[in-house]
Amino acid sequence: MKTIYLDYHATTPVDPRVLEAMLPFYGPQFGNAASGTHRFGWEAEGAVEVARQRIALLAGAEAREIVFTSGATESNNLALKGVVGAAGAAGAHIVTLATEHQAVLDTACTLERAGCRVTTLRVRPDGLVDLEELRAAIGPETVLVSVMYANNEIGVLQPVRQIGAMCRENHVLFHCDAVQAFGKLPVSVDADNIDLMSVSAHKMYGPKGVGALYVRRRNPRVLLKAQMDGGGHEGGMRSGTLNVPGIVGFGEACAVAAEEMAQEYGRLGVLRDRLKRRLEEGLEGVHVNGGMEHRLAGNLNVSFEGVDGDALLVALPDLAVSMGSACSSHGGGGSHVLRAIGTRADLMQSATRFGLGRYTTEEEVEYAAGRVVEVVRRLREQRPV
């Protein structure tokens, strides 16, 4: 039985072009990018710098502003802890949202236990932040606002440009977890007024285990306290031997995205709307979680009235979908994102995330919609009266 992959927000398959670019760096070009005395090191360093330039180009940044990490979780930790540590103020204050990724929320909790003041704002039922509430939350001691670009569960796109402008007006740094948006939407750190931005390769058809943090170096220059010591790599911000094959793959993924993301985004929007239409035509009691107006093209998060979520997953072994984010599915207690937008408990329990991506076809969408309609109808018929 073939399983159709519809969980592109959890991870993406490595694009064959990306894999091809990486393979030489697992073989003959195996050098350490920090080895500056021979050809093997020079080749590795040169490949890393090409990738750095490609990532910077896609972000609208300068190459020297890209710091390589092991992934977005590390990038988020470095951004939040690095800013607070560099501020050196016991009363430092940061502002974030209740719907952020756990890599931001958990880091904020750690900082709070260490004496930092954290304000976690609610969001509206559509998942968007109230800009006036955000403005009111920023005060004289605020050093950082952290708001994600696109939500990993409900796909909602926050008004990043307005948030960045508000932070700039108040002389507060703006960090954006752009993992779900980078490589899918046009992102410009200057136009969006972003000072720090976390990105990850495996969410955009690159390899797992490599990410980056954009750190603004001009107007204003962002200062960070390093969280890893030992060698002073990456301008002293992140010590450790670089993952050269992964970085090369990340760079190639960015080059592919630069060429293809506009067309790909339009195609995914059509497929996503088709899936939504088929589900709503075939079933009553379908509830979309989060607003549809400002949303990632490949995201559909829906709940089904009168259906047990676990039973739904068990009955759909041929569809790889998610009942929550991959990063929170082992934590229990339901989705913090759905709670934050006020989803009813019974609807939270059946919330299903469909993530469409580069290799999703019309035939797969039609098949998936038909299977979900079939299974939801059967489960509803089997309910005790």
Image (cartoon, grey):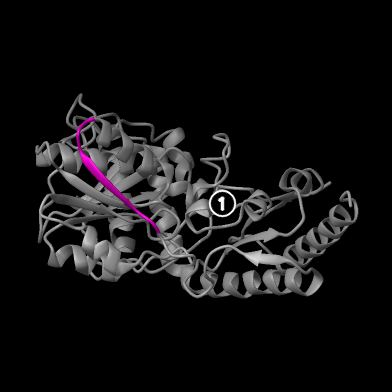
Q: What segment is highlighted magenta in the picture?
A: 114-122
Question: Could you say which is closer to the camera, residue 267 or residue 330?
Answer: 330
* 278 over 327 or under it: above or below: below
Which corner quadrant of the image does residue 310 belong to?
top right
Which residue ends up furthest to the top in the rendered image?
A: 230
Residue 288, percent from left and from top? 62, 66
Q: Is residue 71 visible?
A: no
State left or right for residue 115 relative to residue 354: left
The amino acid type, in three-letter code, at marker 1 is Pro
Residue at image x 86%, y 51%?
383
Residue at image x 17%, y 40%?
84
State left or right for residue 121 relative to residue 284: left
Label 1 residue SS? helix
Residue 140, percent from left and from top? 10, 54
Q: Is residue 289 visible?
A: yes
Residue 222, percent from left and from top? 13, 50
Residue 358, percent from left and from top? 58, 61
Q: How many marks?
A: 1
How many residues crowd mark 1 within 10 Å: few (<14), some (14–19), many (20+)? few
Residue occupied by mark 1? 16
Which corner quadrant of the image does residue 378 belong to?
bottom right
Residue at image x 47%, y 68%?
261
State left or right for residue 160 relative to residue 200: left
Question: Could you say which is closer to the camera, residue 380 or residue 240?
Answer: 380
